[in-house]
Amino acid sequence: MSLWDHHLILLPILLPMIMASAMLLFDERRRRLKSVISLTAMAAILLVALALLHESVTGAADGGDTARVYRLGDWDAPFGIVLVADRLSAMMVALTSVLGAGVLAFALARWDRAGPRFHALFLFLIMGVNGAFLTGDLFNLFVFFEIMLAASYGLALHGSGEARIRAGLTYIAINLTASLLFLIGVSVLYGVTGTLNMAEFALKVRTIAPDDLGLLHVGAAILGTAFLIKCAAWPLGFWLAPTYTAASAPAAAAFAILSKVGVYVVLRLSLLAFGDQAGASAHFGQHWLLFVGLATLAFGTLGLMASRDLSRAAAYAVMVSSGTILAVAGVGDKAVLGGALFYLIGSTLACGAMFLLAEVLQRGVDSGAQRERAVFDDEYRDPFDDDERNEPGLVIPAAVAALGGALLICTLMIAGLPPLSGFIGKLAMLDGLVRTIGPASIAVIVGLSLSSLGGLIGLTRLGVGALWARDEDAPELVVGAAELAGMGGLLAACVLLAVFGGVGLSFAEHTAEWLGRPDAYIRAVLGTLP
Amino acid sequence: MSSNLLLLVILAAPFLGAAVAAGLPRHARTAAAVLSWLVSLVSLVSLAALWPRFADGEVLRLAIPWLPSLGVSLILRLDGLSWIFAALILGIGALVVLYARYYMSPKDPVPRFFSFLLAFMGAMQGVVLSGNLIQLAVFWELTSLFSFLLIGYWHQNPSAREGARMALTVTALGGLCLLVGMILIGAIAGSYDLDDVLAAKSVILADPRSVPALALVLMGALTKSAQFPFHFWLPRAMAAPTPVSAYLHSATMVKAGIFLLLRMWPIFGQTELWYFVVAGAGVATLLIGAWCAIFQHDLKGLLAYSTISHLGLIVLLLGLGSPLGAIAAIFHTVNHATFKASLFMAAGIIDHEAGTRDMRKLSGLYRFMPITGTLAIVAAAAMAGVPLLNGFLSKEMFLAEVVAGSDGHALNSALPVLATLASAFGVLYSLRFILATFFGPPPTALDKVPHEPPAWMRRPVEILVALCLLVGVLPAITVGPFLRSAAVAVLGFDDLPYYSLALWHGFNMPLLLSVLALAGGVLAYALFGKALNNNPRGGPWGLKRLNGGYLFEKAMSGIVKGARWAESRLGADRMQPQLRLVVLAALAAGAAAAFAGGVAIRPTWAAPGAAELVFAVLWLTGGACAVAAAWQAKYHRLAAVVLMGGAGLVSCITFVWLSAPDLALTQLLVEVVTTVLLLLGLRWLPKRLEDIQVAPAELSRSRRRRRVDLVVAAVVGLSLAFVSYAVMSRPMVEGISRFFVERAYSEGGGRNVVNVILVDFRAFDTFGEITVLGIVGLTVLALLRRFRPASDSLPSPDQKQAREREGPVAEGRKAGDALRDTMLIPRVVMRWMFPFVIVLAVHLFLRGHDLPGGGFAAGVALSIAVLLQYMANGARWVEERLLLRPILWIGWGLTIAAGCGLVAIGFNRPFLTSAFQYVNLPLLGRVPLASAVVFDLGVVLLVVGATVLMLVALAHQSLRRAKDDGEPAQAEEGA
Amino acid sequence: MIRALFPHPVLALGLFAASLLMSGSVEPPAIALAAVLALATPQVMRALDAQTIRIRSPGSILTLAGCVVIDVLRSNWAVAGIILGRRRHERRSGFIHVPLDLKDRYALAVLAVILTATPGTLWVEYDSATGRLLLHVLDLVEEEEWVHLIKTRYERRLMEIFE
Amino acid sequence: MSQAILLWCLTGAQALLAGAMALAAWRVVRGPRAQDRVLGLDTLYLNGMLLLLVFGVRAGSSIYFYAALIIGMLGFAATVALAKFLMRGEVIE
Amino acid sequence: MTEFVLAAAIGVLSAAGTWLLLRPRTFQVIMGLSLLSYAVNLFIFSMGRLRSGMPPITAKGAERPELYADPTPQALVLTAIVISFALTALFLVVLLASRGATGSDHVDGREPAE
Amino acid sequence: MTPPDLPAWAAVTVGVLAVAGAGLSFLGAVGLCGFKTFYERVHAPTLGATLGMALIVAASILFFTFAEGRLMPRELLIGVFLTVTTPVTLILLARAALFRDRVERGRDETSGEP
Ligand code: NA
Ligand code: NA
């Protein structure tokens, strides 16, 4: 194993961090350099993620699934912190880098100038997200959540403006509260089990003293609440729509992955620690996931239909996506979960693209994001403050057609209509659900179908308004080449995902199956399975 | 060519063509038309070439794997039924393309039109060629989608947008139902493959899930085929360009529903549900459509309702469940496609040449466009079911079928009457179509003089009308073989009943009914023709209330309104309710888990010792401070800050008391910085006065809210206290800590276990934590750079203003002297404290590994040293003397921490692996050197950078203001 | 050269002592550290352009210190008495003005520390233009007496030390 | 015996200091004016620091010394900031 | 007894913090968050059980590890302190910005409608 | 906890010093609560800050000197720094109070009776 191969898993975290730190050492003026650095970083992370993905699928001695474990500081689990790349985390890292690359490309057209230190904040966000996906330690997860959130606070407010600040305040307050819940939950779990390592925690859950079971569940429930807040689950996710709507387009698009971090953690922990093997704790909280997921799905769909503009609809689409996966996780069927994982990929990319697209379509119409001039001029001024260049760089012809196509793809993806990957995911879920027919599956089937319909109704109404029924005095639609490249990249990924749906779906299904047998994960992390 | 390739061409050519057309320049009208024409021709030829390959009942299949794990592959499956539909789609498609070339205005982006049209054609091919249920649903939705784009092509026109949306919504709704239905059928049959499904008929029918499955599938078919009560979208879709109407509503879109019914017929055709739903919808649609058509003034409107009615007829035929009915349905589908396409095209020509489609404005056009007129008359006659035309034949079969089945159900016995009535209506509106348009006095209300269209625009109509005639006269030769192979595909080779495609079946009941209908229609026109033409209200008599489109629009806006209402009721946009929900949710989750699992407390109560009483007194103090802080935070913010300091101090002492000196140190230092930060912020908050008058209603509401919150807060407090006590009262579990304590010195090189955890065992946490700090620094900077204070906090604080007003009281005093004198002593002390605090910080840093302290504490101490200088001397003064570049400190701090971690990689150890060594230095002796110290140095740099950045950026806000006022700077000579 | 190395010798000495005390050890590493800090840290005072403290009469420091210790002890006793309720009715507190001749800011600072650290007196405000000091006294017996006390016991000695 | 006396004395000292803290906190809570509260906090800090010193003696460990030293050296920064805010309405000018 | 006092302290701090968290003024919220983070820090700390006079500072090699106070929660609290300090600062700045941009110190950026 | 090798007289001295110092501090706190005006209150805590502190520092030094068998005067640092910094707070506070009284209550405490 070569030097870098061994440390590969570190790169998705370390690379953006080092790049961002290095950027702090340069002057803010060196935009081109920063753009190159950021894009390179994203590309490198993508490659790394693919390599990790490949290994997680084929890396075991028998050529099967495996989890690669990296012992930070050379301390064994459960004492030191470990990074773990298995199918799920590698997939999420890959997804993050694709989304990140698209968003970054979009931002290079002009948004990265709307406030200071965009690139650094963006890379820190990526670092936090990747860390949350890769860490195998509960408290370290908290730390990465905080990195991710801190960067997201900065990005949510990127570009300033009253709407952003107003929404940002709520966003931050709620997430700070959620972080406190996170801490309470993790510490209770530590108090009861004496460990922070996820794998060891899963083992300890199995053998917990009956007397401690209640406390363990209290900790898990509080922790779960914290994660559901990040998932924007109903009724804990009302912060999402205002924040994402007000945020600048690239920020909002990048945030499409944030709620997925919550979803990821819910999936990871519930399947690792509270799966079939968990004894008295088996399937802990699963019913709640179902209810909350369905409620989120319903509320997200309602919100989507109620939205008055596309970016808000995109925000609700994020909620719909969370709700879908949570509800499916609540059904607790592996076949269905595979579909949900596949759906997760496509819906995240589509929601991201939707935010970008919405910004292009609403440009000039949008009032929430007006740029304000500082009242003061002082030494903390950024040299680009006065740079009022608002053009998105090289402008491409036939903008309307291109944007129309993009909007169509987004709509299909979000509504889960054929033939794109959104549909494949839904199909796979429905296919699994009808096989496990019961009240829960029927509820989810109805929910999924209605949300598709609602999504279609809502998005067509808004899309028709934004593209076909533009005001006479609305500015002509222009889209920069970089912007189109960013959006197009994300949408192309959605299309590719449909074309190679068989491969993708089989990957997702195997991932669900892999998640269903946590012993392999635990063995990889702890070396043995006592 | 292999049949596989041909099959592929049939499906792929339109999509490829669509892609190419989309890329053509905006004005390439002819190129796009030629392309489209060639594409449809290529597909048509391929289709025709396949005809000889399947003699009776043979099925061609081509499978392309797509989603193997779901059993969904792309299966192209061609049987007689698919063939006849595909031929219709391609044949009429080719004619429509030709027609559209002349119809479309060069001002429009015509290539896009052709692109959509070809894509739609492809999607239709996909539906009829599907050998897989899911694939069928996929292409089904695609047809909805592309029809949406086609109908909305003239999107500048609001009715086009609305029509498109309505069509999409209704048909996509049906499509979703269809999808779920198909998935259910697939689940029952164990496969999505059409052949497997058809073979599993008995399994399917035996399964109780087949009922919802059928219902869902029918939902799809009926919406697509515009069956009552979903028929309303079709007339609205007339806002589309006429070629689109001609295509969608004759041969394609609406026929997809028919196709689906035919596909499902072998399985479900004889079930009760099928009969009631399909036949019921069919008969209702037949009548309502025909009745509404009578009253239309718009030519296309009339054709639209007529289409609905004819679709109802076909659906009714299928609903009857008899094999002959199915054959008649196929036959009428073909016939309807030909005459309706030609009629739409004719209507388009009239619109194109006369400038209107309003029958009240049109009149006597025959003399201006005799050829078109003749063609229209023939086609309308076919629609009315006049003998010698194709419409007559299939209508005869229909009437025969209705009569033959007129026993048993009440519906059945009523059917002959209803069918005759509907036929009479058909005669009536056909007559009206012709007479009101082509005959009568010359038109007066037209803007231009109508004339014949370009010859090639008429050519498609001519071909179609010729087909109507040909089939009408020679049915067995022209359409016989195709009909037969389609019938075989539906009914099977063995169950094919006897039927005759002859023109003359002798005098029989159906003929009588036909004649009755013809006579009745003519009579009705004679009686009511004038009234109909002048019907001012436009709508159909008796059915005004039943305006589906209107209801739909009401429903849609109701849905949006309802969604908004629900969103506002189920959601919360204000912060307090959201936070309350979060708190309540956490409480509920915790409580639910606790009650389910049971939480026992095992108190170990011993008589409290004196020291414990002291501890209790301490917390009496701390608790009082906390409660008072909560009490005062609204009106006395400073008091709250002070009180919180008290609570914080007690926490620190608690940490010392309970063996956590590191925590105490850190918390103390952080307290100081936080207090200063809060004070820096306080300056920008508005004054809050206790004696503001509040409305009594608001007062009582806020009282209620406060009471609720008080309860919530108390419950939170009790719960957390309970949980912590429950854990504390339990024996320690054997966990990871033992390892840390055992190895901290031997393997981490430090005696302070907490610090070794922070910089070694769990250094990655610290690594992340400092990153958070750095990010927050950046964010703070970004926010403050655009900070815009509220107008009322712009001026200097009152204290300062008053001080300046106090002014130079004594001789020789200048402004600012007062401050200088006050700060004289503090400045001296604070300035000279600077180096001592640095020494303290160095000690904190160096001892951290063995004793309480560490990088973070050192960093905050250093920040406080800087802060003291700022407080004593003012920002300007300090910055003239100390060059602090906090962002650089942050950058270097992070870089050093990461770099230190990376060094380990050079030694092929994992990131952040620490090394330590005792080194013998001259004079100093044995000194421990741990690489973690370098990591800690990064921590120091970062903490200083971030903390100073936050403090200074905040402090600078007042400075900025000072610049505007031209207030004298506070610099002064050295101390 | 020496100046550059030791811009503030008194400070360096103080830092050396402080560092040793913080280390709690007189082992070679602690001494080395103290020496390094004593050498390096005063350099930052250069940036803050602090005037060097000049002590003219080191001997007077001891006398002053003795005075202060005695006064502190005495006034602790006095104030404790007041708190415990002695002389509750006759006691009167208030402000007095003391005209000062001291100009050196370090001297003033030391005076401020002494006066404030002594229970019962509090330095409130000093007017640099007039040299008037506003003092709050807990037990104000005779204003003149206080002025006299301050000027003779402290100011004179401080002027000896610093000016 | 002497050890017991020492222990009792130290406990008594702790109790007195805790009592002093409680009184100071009472002043902080009570006010009435901001300067009283700040003064109360200053006293609270002072007594807290002394409590830590006594605690160190009681525990026989010098580990707690730094906590006390930090209050002694830097605790005043918080109260200075409060006082300055009271005086000027701004902490850093 | 110590456990009971500490539990009560956590309860009081968190109750006061929660009450403030639910108040309508931004400053109240930030104070609430600060009080809550005190409470949470103590809570985390309490999860390692309490031990007086045995800080986890070992002699050269710990003979009886079980005697020392649990160092892990202490390390966690340290991290939590730092993070909550940073986020308090951030929240403060955002609330100032909100007050500046909206003119109101209400958490919703506008005074509640009558 | 107390090391056994502390001589009896030293132990008693340490105890007495500590109690005396704590007592003075307590007295100061009593004064803080008991005095009627701010200007009187401000004097009270100096009891603890000077002699009280000195006694406790002495106790600590004495204790550790005997406990460790060598001179351990490091609490002196606390004494020095506390002595130097306490006046800073008090001066600023008194000045602020004076000013606030002048501005907000229209009273100049320096000229009239308290
Ligand atoms: Na936006
Ligand atoms: Na004094």
Image (tube, grey):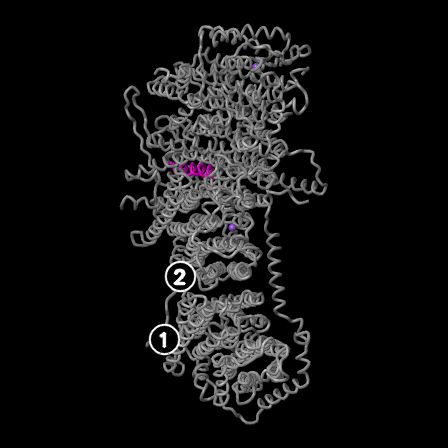
Q: Which residue is mark 1?
A: B6
In terms of secondary structure, where does tag 2 sit? helix
Q: x, y (%) of residue B405?
A: 57, 84
Q: Is residue C114 above or below residue B555?
A: above
Residue farthest to the bottom, as pictured? B506
Q: Is residue B357 above or below residue F94?
A: below
Q: Nearer the viewer, residue A41 or B608?
A: A41
Alpha carbon separation for disc pair 2 and 1: 25 Å
Looking at the rendered image, the quarter that the C terminus of chain F falls into is top right
Q: Is residue C8 among the parts visible in the rendering? A: yes
Q: Which residue is mark 2?
A: A501
Amino acid bearing label 2? Gly
Residue farthest to the right, as pictured? B696
Q: Is residue B264 among the parts visible in the rendering? A: no
Q: Is residue A306 above or below residue B887?
A: below
In terms of secondary structure, where does tag 1 sit? helix
Q: x, y (%) of residue A18?
A: 37, 40
Please check the rendered image and state whether residue B776 is part of the magenta-colored stretch, yes or no: yes
The chain under label 2 reads: A
Q: Nearer the viewer, residue B6 or B296?
A: B296
Q: Nearer the viewer, residue B701 or B816?
A: B816
Amino acid bearing label 1? Leu
Query: In the image, what residue occupies the spot 36% across and 37% down?
Result: B898
The chain under label 1 reads: B
Please check the rendered image and state whether residue B278 is part of the magenta-colored stretch, yes or no: no
User: In the image, which residues are magenta?
Assistant: B761-778
